[in-house]
Image (spheres, rainbow, N blue to C red):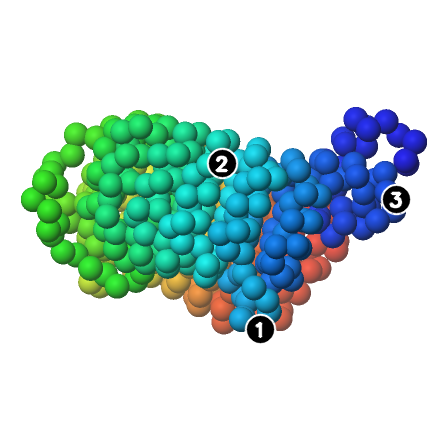
Amino acid sequence: MEDLPEPLLAEILKWITRASDRNSLSLVSKHLYTIEAEHRDTIRIGCGLHSTTEPLESLFSRFPNLLKVEIDYSCCSSSQGKQLDNQGLHMLLSHCPSLSDLTLSSCSYVNNSSLAYVSCFAKLRSLRLKCTSTVNSSGLLSVVAGCKSLSLLHLVDCKGVDNMEWLEYLGRYGSWEELVVKNCNEIRRYDLLKFGPGWAKLQKFEFEMNGKYRCTPPHDPSYPHSYDISCENLKELRLARIVTTQVFGLRFLLGKCKALEKLWLEFVVGLNENELIKIFQNCSNLKSISIWRCSFQFGTALTNNTFKALALSCPMLQVLEISCRIGYTQKGIVALVQSCPIRDLVLNGGSIFRDEGAEGLSCSRFLERLHLVCCSSITDAAMNFIIESPCLSNLTLSRCDNVTDDGMAVLVINRSSNSRQKL
């Protein structure tokens, strides 16, 4: 293998994706050790490496062409050695000038001064900060102002970020494609409206609160009560654990994203049936939708009418995930699956889903994956229908208490006797 030309060796290395396999290969000979190091573009640093000067210097010197670095101390304790600090980031900057993707997770020593080094990565396109409580808005502003190529930002459990000056800068001068904000207590859904013109370029957006359903009016009188904001390029939208109102907040997004292909609404309180129908009518390109208990108090926005609107308005729908217990019937679900080319269906908590519903699903020409969770009304009889599904290759049953060993035996026997059955 050592006699192979370097371009061919480099091509072979592309097909070896596991770090352990590449490490083993590099030990075969000095030549392979050198070639592998030159073509390694991704590493992950965790508890196993003592982040003192000498080990880091050796590591970054060995891999000069790194494009993606993940530093994750989420499962580490103080007894497992020193974490990466400002000096470590400075070494990373010195040895890996081509870095384009950086993730910092649970890095206790990463602060605003650290982000000053991060802002010097001229080719950085993606930055993910997770559980970095010592970073605040000033540090973020230095990064977004310094990294002109930055197009992806994830903020997860960043408790110190409050002032939205960095977000306004993003909207005015950045060219952003993906923005994810999760469990950042001081970033409110109203604050995100300050992203302004940045919404027009954004392709993916996620916002999740920490589970404390807060619905308070904005304190800043400069917040608009109606939003003339374009988000025509947004293709993926996820909203989770928020209370919506008709006047304030991110609710405006649901009526403006006409190019939307993937939609997740998880524990979004305040939506009603008519609003969901309007969303589906505006988003004819939807290919994937996940709805988790989008309700107000004990009601639900999901009904057979919303399923009908979804079937009529979104003919390209392929993935459907529903986690609601009331408001609709199995007739509505079956009609939707039979009307759209749905390949992947997850039904969680559908106590109204019975054996007759399984019979209806078995007629689908497209269904490949079916996941039923807490569907307590289906029995062994449903398995007899499911085995008739022409394309079904993946079935998962979770806490479906009335399916017994006899029902599972039907699946096993059918799979053994029918060579065409992929299940």
Front one among 115 and 229: 115
Q: Is there any visible trace of residue 13 in the rendered image?
A: yes
Question: Which residue sits at x=90%, y=35%?
Answer: 2
Task: Say few, some or many: other residues with alpha carbon within 10 Å of mark 1 (under 14 / 14 to 19 / 20 or more).
Answer: few
Question: Which residue sits at x=32%, y=41%?
Answer: 141
Residue occupied by mark 3: 29
Q: Earlier in the sequence, mark 2 or mark 3?
A: 3
Q: Compared with residue 119, is residue 285 higher up or lower down, i.e. above or below?
A: above
Amino acid carrying label 1: it is Ser
Residue occupied by mark 2: 121
Q: Is there any visible trace of residue 327 in the rendered image?
A: no
Question: Which residue sits at x=30%, y=48%?
Answer: 137
Q: Position of residue 223 (x, y in %)?
A: 12, 41
The N terminus is located in which quarter?
top right
Q: Earlier in the sequence, mark 1 or mark 2?
A: 1
Question: Which residue sits at x=44%, y=55%?
Answer: 110
Front one among 409 and 347: 347
Q: Position of residue 55 (x, y in %)?
A: 66, 55
Q: Earlier in the sequence, mark 1 or mark 3?
A: 3
The answer to which quarter of the image holds residue 69 is top right
**Mark 1 to mark 2 CA distance (whole Å):** 31 Å
**Mark 1 to mark 3 CA distance (whole Å):** 35 Å
Amino acid carrying label 3: it is Ser
Residue occupied by mark 1: 79
